[in-house]
């Protein structure tokens, strides 16, 4: 009689450590956030590369992916911040990925409009007009994520306003 090997569960601390490492890896934009210069800008550039193909997949799928990026981002960035020992670590750039996704929502799939959205998003992310600065005070991953989501919303509104004005329709 051959016995099946006994399967042992990994200790809780090992699983927790794996989750911590995964969260930091994901929240740092697969490591891009460790850039020594301008990690937020680097994260935003990676976001352009991630959202570029999604822009041609249709608005519904884009919206689902964007919602997933935001919803998953809240607990992942919160855990990464806890592991890194800072409230909003500069190397956590998943918020930039999600914020750029908002900025690019329904923007024409053209380099010019992606570049305009990128510039406006970075401006609003750095300047933090009302209420963006207040959103940073939200607890955990909410504060990390939602200031960038709002920066993306402001950028998207301006891009779509520019598109509307450029179209010449009343």
Image (cartoon, rainbow, N blue to C red):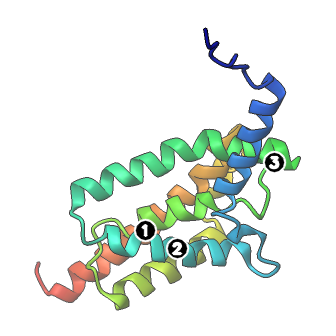
Residue carrying label 1: 103
Circles 1, 2 touching at the beta carbon (< 8 Å): yes
Q: Quadrant of residue 12?
A: top right
Of 65 and 14, the residue lying toward us: 14
Return the residue nearer the eye: 148 or 83.
Answer: 83
Measure how far apart labels 1 and 3 are at the Cα level: 24 Å
Name the N-terminal-most of marks 1 and 2.
Answer: 1
Residue found 63% across the figure and 63% down from its top = 29
What is the spatial separation of the Cα atoms under label 3 and label 2, in whole angstroms? 22 Å
* Inter-mark Cα distance, 1 to 2: 6 Å
Q: Quadrant of the N terminus?
A: top right
Residue 74, by quadrant, is top right
Q: Residue beneath label 2, please?
A: 121
Dot 1 falls on a residue whose secondary structure is helix
17 left or right, relative to 29: right
Looking at this view, is 7 or 25 the one in front? Answer: 7
Please tell me the numbered disc located at residue 87: 3
Q: Specify whether 9 is left or right of 55.
A: right
> Toward the viewer: 110 or 116?
110
Residue 128 lies, in percent from the top left, at 64, 65
Quarter of the image for residue 83 reads top right
Density class for disc 3 (Cα within 10 Å; few <14, some 14-19, many ≥20) is some
In this rendering, would 72 be left or right of 40?
Answer: left
Going 77% across and 76% down the picture, which residue do you hit? 35
Tags 3 and 2 touching, CB below 8 Å: no
Q: How far across and how far down the image is residue 135, in percent? A: 63, 48
Q: Is residue 159 above or below residue 4?
A: below
Q: Position of residue 90 (x, y in %)?
A: 77, 64
């Amino acid at each position: 009689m051959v016995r099946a090997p006994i399967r042992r569960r990994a200790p809780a601390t090992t699983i927790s450590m794996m989750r911590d490492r995964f969260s930091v890896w994901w929240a740092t934009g697969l490591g891009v956030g460790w850039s020594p210069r301008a990690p937020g800008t680097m994260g935003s550039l990676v976001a352009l590369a991630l959202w570029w193909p999604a822009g041609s997949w249709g608005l519904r799928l884009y919206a689902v992916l964007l919602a997933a990026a935001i919803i998953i981002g809240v607990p992942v960035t919160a855990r990464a911040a806890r592991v890194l020992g800072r409230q909003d670590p500069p190397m956590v750039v998943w918020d930039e990925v999600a914020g750029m996704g908002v900025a690019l929502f329904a923007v024409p799939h053209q380099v010019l409009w992606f570049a305009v959205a990128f510039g406006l998003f970075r401006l609003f992310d750095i300047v933090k007009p009302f209420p963006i600065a207040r959103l940073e005070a939200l607890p955990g991953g909410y504060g990390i994520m939602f200031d960038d989501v709002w920066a993306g919303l402001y950028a998207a509104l301006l891009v779509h306003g520019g598109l509307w004005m450029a179209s010449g329709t009343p």
